[in-house]
Image (tube, coloured by chain):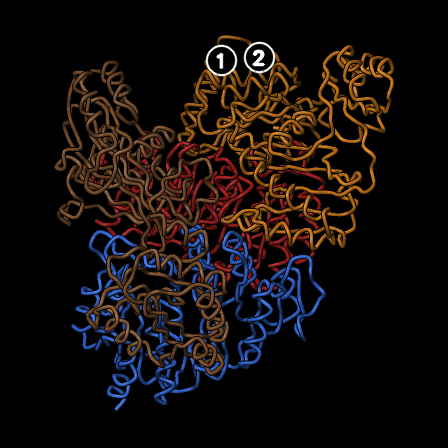
Chain colours: A brown, B blue, C orange, D red
């Protein structure tokens, strides 16, 4: 779950990481008031996307009326394809230096890794390798003081600045582990006078750990279909093509999409029905797929634990209840495949043996 | 021979009395796996078929030699179950559950490393040394003995490929499911040297997907250390960046882990990448000649 | 630092471990009130000693007036050589079973060790070995649920009782580590109806970690002299003999005491002056020793880092300022020993070469 | 030969710029110890005499081969300093500070065990391989080469005994100060096998004290595994139960760790226990014949 900047900063503050004075505004009137309170302000639209400045989503002003007007224009409008529901109004910092700090998970060492650079404020991909400090944290011991010192040493920091960054590193690490974060990123971390302040916040919480963080604000990133699928225990992603897809297993679903593409088609969705494809789940899955208004549907089942006759029965039952207005191509192999195919024949469908034959057929249907 | 597990591996099932646990225990036994014990807190003393149930892994190990364990518990309890097995000294632990919090996975992997336990998964179908021992949930019928070692990041796709190989008369030595999560116990570079050492394995099939850099690292490793032929198939060619395709690991982030990058890295070290899964058996037959 | 039972129970409650209803009383009026509130009560004198029942420090009553009278008699009185400053008045439990639980530190494995038994309520030394479960906790992972389950399994517990004891074990372990405890002990842990309740509390906090637990109530166990010594950075213990002792190093100070005993004497104190024996510290150390009204003083210095001339100068300076009314025997060897002996000679003291000669002489003086 | 450290050991001093650090560094160099680097956060680039100072142990190790380190920092910072050294890969770490919280000591020992670092202390004078390398704060003059290995729980008492041996013409191979705290890195049973293996060590002196069961365990170990003669001296015969005699470890609790129990255990395996410290050299001479 990605957090909006303002939520990330609220968490920063909670964990003791310095952030600029200010707060979120959900109405233009609030924006007016905050700028009136803090004076020289930066107003930032809150969307889950970078490059907000270039898109016109950020403004500097000391005038509450200007703040209000800007907020009024932004709130409810679309920016980089996303609706702006909130804006963050905060004190404009005198920026002397911009650093970069982030903690994420390293798949190779299976440990948290700190990324740190004295070249912050830009896209992190653009930072030259020699300016990027990578420090693998020993998971068992966490971010001890010596580790934080070592990171600032490698960054080339000294004096009080180094001490402040060390403190921020320890707090950021605490937040990273306490909140089950996948990513905590401060870019830029700003040196302003004697202070070191987090001027932006990018925080991603592990969806699989949200059950133990009920106190966190929830940010919905999923489309309506994705939400519905999630409730049904299906892995579902909206895509742009016109062939509805259902398969069992993430890898095979991806492979089905690839195979469709290989034959010149495009999938309307990713839908992994997993192991259990009972009648209700199958019906709901088809409903989700139909909502995308596809020109054809491809069902790709490799029965292992999933039994082909179960899948066929579920599909047949759905088909009997409601006509499916587009061609359905089914590939069905594995456990009890003969019985499954018989059941499908009864509802007028001839199952295919292989994924590529089925995909080819679906692409053909979708082109007509 | 085979890697990690063989016909002498004594297997424990953690959570044996649940529906899933009991069903798959029977499937494993049917395959020929030596399931010697199960655990279920509070149900010690019961039996599942002929298999004794204990209250804890420690108690099971007091009574029986145990080499490997498979975990059938909900994701929220997986950490405790994994730590219990590692703490008790299990050498190979198969973790099926998906949706295990990634910080829990980190904790498990670091503890396992300290104690010398090999973790398969999480979010895996398990592993099978064909004809000898299956620890997992894969359908029995496709895993027939033969000369090909398979290591895969995803489950059903592996069945698809192993199935198409079996149809083409190509059996497998060991098939290892690494698991679909971001943090898993084994990566390709951990399994490749095992296949390299295994005299029965004549060719290796690597089933990868988008996300992460495991395939790129595998390519670098193959270049330096692997003399046996390797064939690959990668899923996710058509996936848009930033979207998670079911597997937590299958996401293209910050331009890392793209399909094209992986294919390029593998091709550069002489690994042919099949465009469609059904082409894998042909490519394997070609390299086996 | 040992905690009184009521303080330990306050901590138990804070960490979620069930304790009987009730609270501490520091006046007999409070005792009256608490018994009036909770009815059937047990009243326990709060001293840092076991066997309070046998000494008359525990009473059962449901009558507030009786509670008041008992408290009035106890408060301020002496029990097992200790003054009773507080009493704990709490609900009398219906005791069905008595268990024992403790966590302490195992020197060998350098890990916490849990001691658990279904034979509680008695002196733990009296519990037969076969009824004592010893579980070494893996320090890096702590008391995970599986470990707690394994402990109750080995204890032979089942059902809801096992679950409650498991929860208590996890909370007790959390308290053990959070509070830097050396020992947390519940004896007895009582099964009363459906509940499992800590009926007693023995908690010892690591003195060396008190600096990070300023919020804990402080319990002073040291005598006035021991307190004063502590402030001076000296390790000091009151003893019963008549030879005042000062040496440099814990081991050698112990050995000095042993040597005195070997020759038939007895030390009045243990005083380890450590490495730095400057003039002020020496003066204060002698003051502490003199307060014990000894019949002789033995100073045993093995100079290593401590320089003999420094020690001699410090002693000579003290001696010049105030007469010491008892014989002083000094053993002085090591770095700069010649210069040190010259300085002592100037104040009329002939230093000894060996500890045993000096000890013999001190014993001789003390006998006269 | 010698145990743990020898003439080739490269030593780091953590906290070299403090008073204590600088003073004892000079003493160690005077003794012949190869002190190759020091650390002091924020003072990297300075020198103490000819010894370069670095900001961190990791930085020091990038620049110099380091085998052992000695820690001169206040007790409250000892944990961080110890973890820094262990994390950087130091093989032997001497921890002088006393009053380190015992839970910190547990954390340190468990991390050291995982990383393969040997910890001496805390609350120790250090260790010295006589004539070769001294890492600690003991006075140089008494530590002369000879055939006796010494392992001790207390400092000045060791000087007393090593001094009286030196006066009697008996030198030492290595003298190890275990440290006076309850949780220390090495116990007698860890050091005894090292002396047993060391060809230069002909006899072993064990300097114990009341509290704990280290001496009792040593006795059991000596019975099984030690062929060389052992002589002991124990402090605390006259100490009353329940009182801590300076050392955190020197306390008789619950009837455990009494003087009498320890003497009995040692005598039972043929170890003579000197009644007075000055008798130790005579006993050693006797067993060396």
Placement of D8 over or under B194, stated as above or below: above
Residue under disc 1 on the same chain as residue under disc 2: yes
The answer to whether B225 is drawn above or below residue D88 in the figure is below
For the C terminus of chain C, the quadrant is top right
Residue linked to disc 1: C318
- State left or right for residue D131 relative to residue B140: left
Q: Which mark is residue C361?
A: none
Instruction: Specify the quadrant of the image occupied by residue D249.
Output: top right
Q: Is residue C122 visible?
A: yes
Which residue is at a point 49% across and 15% down the rendered structure image? C347
In which chain is the residue bearing label 1? C
- Report helix, strand or loop for mark 1: helix
- Report if residue D289 is visible in the image: no
Q: Which residue is mark 2?
A: C324
Asked whether, in this view, residue A297 is left or right of residue D150, the answer is: left
Check whether the beta carbons of the residues at disc 1 and disc 2 lie within 8 A of each other: yes
**Place of residue C326 in the rendered image (x, y in percent of width and height, measured from the top left):** 62, 15
Q: For the point 51% across and 51% down, which residue is it?
A: B76
Residue at the farthest bottom position: B289
- Residue C278 image offset from top left, x and y in percent: 43, 20
Task: Compare residues C343 and B225 and report the one nearer the observer.
Answer: B225
């Amino acid at each position: 779950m990605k957090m909006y900047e303002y939520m990330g900063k609220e968490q920063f503050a909670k964990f003791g990481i310095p952030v600029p004075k200010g707060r979120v505004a959900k109405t233009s009137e609030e924006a007016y008031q905050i700028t009136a309170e803090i004076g020289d302000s930066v107003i930032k639209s809150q969307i889950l996307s970078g490059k907000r400045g270039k898109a016109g989503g950020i403004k500097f002003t000391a005038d509450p009326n200007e703040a209000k007007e800007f907020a009024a224009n932004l709130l409810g409008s679309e920016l980089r394809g996303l609706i702006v529901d909130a804006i963050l109004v905060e004190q404009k910092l005198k920026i002397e230096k911009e650093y970069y700090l982030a903690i994420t998970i390293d798949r190779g060492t299976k440990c948290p890794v700190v990324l740190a650079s004295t070249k912050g404020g830009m896209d992190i991909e653009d930072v030259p390798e020699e300016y990027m400090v990578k420090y693998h944290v020993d998971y068992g011991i966490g971010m001890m003081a010596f580790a934080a010192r070592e990171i600032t040493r490698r960054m080339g920091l000294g004096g009080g600045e180094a001490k402040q960054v060390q403190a921020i590193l320890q707090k950021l690490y605490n937040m990273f582990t306490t909140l089950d974060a996948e990513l905590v990123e401060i870019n830029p971390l700003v040196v302003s006078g004697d202070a070191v302040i987090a001027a932006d916040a990018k925080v991603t919480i592990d969806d699989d750990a949200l059950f133990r963080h009920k106190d966190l604000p929830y940010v919905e990133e999923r489309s309506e279909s994705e939400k519905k699928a999630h409730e049904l225990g299906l892995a579902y992603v909206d895509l742009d093509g016109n062939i509805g897809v259902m398969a069992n297993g993430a890898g095979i679903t991806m492979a089905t999409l690839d195979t469709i593409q290989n034959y010149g088609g495009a999938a309307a969705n990713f839908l992994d029905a997993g192991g259990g494809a009972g009648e209700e789940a199958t019906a709901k899955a088809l409903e989700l797929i139909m909502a995308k208004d596809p020109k054809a549907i491809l069902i790709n089942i490799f029965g292992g634990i999933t039994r082909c006759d179960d899948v066929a029965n579920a599909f047949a039952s759905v088909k009997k209840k409601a006509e499916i207005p587009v061609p359905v191509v089914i590939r069905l192999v594995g456990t009890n495949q003969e019985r499954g195919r018989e059941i499908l024949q009864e509802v007028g469908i001839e199952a295919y043996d292989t994924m590529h034959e089925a995909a080819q057929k679906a692409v053909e249907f979708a082109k007509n | 021979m085979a890697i990690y597990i063989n016909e002498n591996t004594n297997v424990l099932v953690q959570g044996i009395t649940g529906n899933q646990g009991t069903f798959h225990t029977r499937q494993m036994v049917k395959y020929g796996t030596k399931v010697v014990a199960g655990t279920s807190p509070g149900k010690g003393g019961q039996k599942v078929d002929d298999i004794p149930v204990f209250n804890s892994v420690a108690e099971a190990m007091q009574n029986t030699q145990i080499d490997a364990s498979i975990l059938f518990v909900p994701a929220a309890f997986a950490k405790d179950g994994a730590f219990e097995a590692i703490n008790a000294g299990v050498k190979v632990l198969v973790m099926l559950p998906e949706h295990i919090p990634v910080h829990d996975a980190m904790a498990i992997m670091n503890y396992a490393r300290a104690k010398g336990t090999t973790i398969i998964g999480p979010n895996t179908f398990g592993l099978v040394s064909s004809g000898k021992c299956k620890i997992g949930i894969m359908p029995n019928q496709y895993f027939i003995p033969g000369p090909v070692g398979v290591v895969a990041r995803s489950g059903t796709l592996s069945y698809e490929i192993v199935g198409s190989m079996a149809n083409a008369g190509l059996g497998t030595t060991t098939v290892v499911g690494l698991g679909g999560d971001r943090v898993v116990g084994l990566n390709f570079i951990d399994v490749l040297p095992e296949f390299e050492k295994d005299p029965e394995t004549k060719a290796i099939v690597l089933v990868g997907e988008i996300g992460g850099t495991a395939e790129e690292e595998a390519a670098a490793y193959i270049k330096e250390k692997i003399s046996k032929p390797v064939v690959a198939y990668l899923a996710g060619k058509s996936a848009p960046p930033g979207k998670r395709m079911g597997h937590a690991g299958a996401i293209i982030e910050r331009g890392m882990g793209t399909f094209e990058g992986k294919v390029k890295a593998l091709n550069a070290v002489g690994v042919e990448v099949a465009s469609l899964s059904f082409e894998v058996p042909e490519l394997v037959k070609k390299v086996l000649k």
